[in-house]
Amino acid sequence: MNRRFVHILLAAALLLTGSASCVRRPLLEPEESVEIQVKVNIEAISNVTTDIYNERIPVPDLTTDMMRVLVYDPDTHNLLTQSFISHKTYTEDGSQLLSGYLNISYGSYDFVVYNFDTPTTQVSSESNEESLIAYTPEISPTMRTHFLGTRADDYEALNVNFEPDHLVVAREKNFYVSPHDTVVVINTTARTIIDTYYIQIHVEGMQYASSATAVISGLSPSNRFGLNIRTDDPTAAVCFDLNKSTDKNIAGANKDVLCAVFNTFGKIENVSSDLLVTFNVIDIAGNLQQYSCNLDRIFKTEDAIERHWLLIDETFVIQKPNGGGENTSSGGFQPQVDEWDLEEGTIAL
C-alpha cells in the first residue's frame, strides 16, 4: 500500500469521526420544552374596574411585570421546582399576558402562579402547596398608637395589619403534560384573591380636620392560596388613610364625607362582636377626635354584598378645637407651614 493511499484512508477516517461527534442540537430540547402563558383577568373587581362609587378616589393598581410559577407534586403537594416569568404582552381584549418556560418533563403536576411584585403582601411556606400562604405583617407599636389613638389599649389583643396589595393567582390541579416532541403550551388565568371595598361616612365640621385615618376589624388576616382558603383565626384589622370628598346623593346642603378605597383578604362570615370601624381625625389644633360605629348592619346591605360599598348612614361631627383653627374658609384638609427660622453658621469644607 503506497503512502498516498494511506493518507487518503486516514483523511476519510477523520471525516467520519468528525461527522459522528459534531451534531447540531437546539438550545432547548423539544421534549422538555413547556411554556406557560398566564392571562391576568381584572374584570368585574368592585371598586377597581367596576362599581366605582366615587370617581375622585384613587383605586388600586393591578398591573404586574413578573410572576412566580410554583410546580407541585399532585400526590404529596411538595414543591418540585419553580420559575419566574416576565415576558409581557397583551391580549386582544387588553389583558396582561405573562409567559415563560418551565424546565419540567412529562407527567402530572399542580401549578400555582402569582404576581411577584407586591410590596406589602408577603408569601411564605412555599415548600408545600397546602401550607402556601399570603399575608401582611402587623403594624408597629408606633403606628398602632397613630391609628387607634385612645382606643389602643382597648384593642391590645387585636392584630392590626397592613392593608394587602392585590395578589392575582392562577391554579391548575393535576395538569397532565404528555410526552411531546414540540413545545407544550399551558394556558391559565390569574384572578385576584383580594376584596376591595369603598367606605364613607358623612361629616360635619370638615373644615376642622387636618388628617384622618380608619381601622376596620373583623377581617381575614391571610389566605392559604394554594387551596384558596381564607383564614379566620385570629381575626385581624386593617388600617388606612381617609380622603376628604363629597357625595351628591346625601340629602341637605352639607355633602362632606370622609371616604377611602381599601383592600382586605375578606370579611369573615358570622363575625359580629368586633366588626367595628374607628375613624380618627387630627384636627387643625393637633387634637385627636374619634368616632366608632358597628358595621354589622352595613355589611348585610345590598350595596355591601353586591358592590362592596360600605355607606355608613351616620354623621361624624368634628368639634371645633379650642384655642385655634379659625382659618376654615376653604373647608378641606389644610396643611400649614410655619415661618422659617433663620440660622447662621459656618460649613467646613
Image: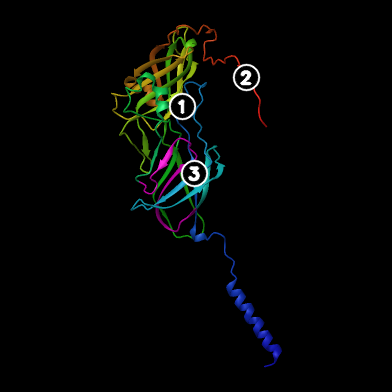
Q: Position of residue 316 (x, y in %)?
A: 40, 12
Disc 3 target residue: 67
> For residue 23, which numbered disc appears in the image?
none
Disc 1 target residue: 47
Magenta-highlighted residues:
102-129
The 10 Å Cα crowd at callout 2, few under 14, some 14 to 19, many 20 or more, is: few
Q: Nearer the viewer, mark 2 or mark 3?
A: 2
Residue 240, relative to residue 316: is it above or below? Answer: below
Query: Which residue lies at the image location 57% right of the left edge and 14% below the top edge?
Result: 338
Is residue 134 found inside the magenta-colored segment of the image? no
Secondary structure type for disc 1? loop
Can residue 248 be seen at all in this image of the molecule?
Answer: no
- Using the image as rendered, state which of residue 281 and residue 198 is in the foreground: 281
Residue furthest to the right:
4
Query: Which residue lies at the image location 65% right of the left edge and 84% below the top edge?
Result: 10
Q: Quadrant of residue 278?
A: top left
Residue 164, relative to residue 171: is it above or below? Answer: above
Spatial separation of the CA atoms under disc 2 and disc 3? 52 Å
Spatial separation of the CA atoms under disc 1 and disc 2? 49 Å
Q: Amino acid at mark 3?
A: Met
Disc 2 target residue: 343
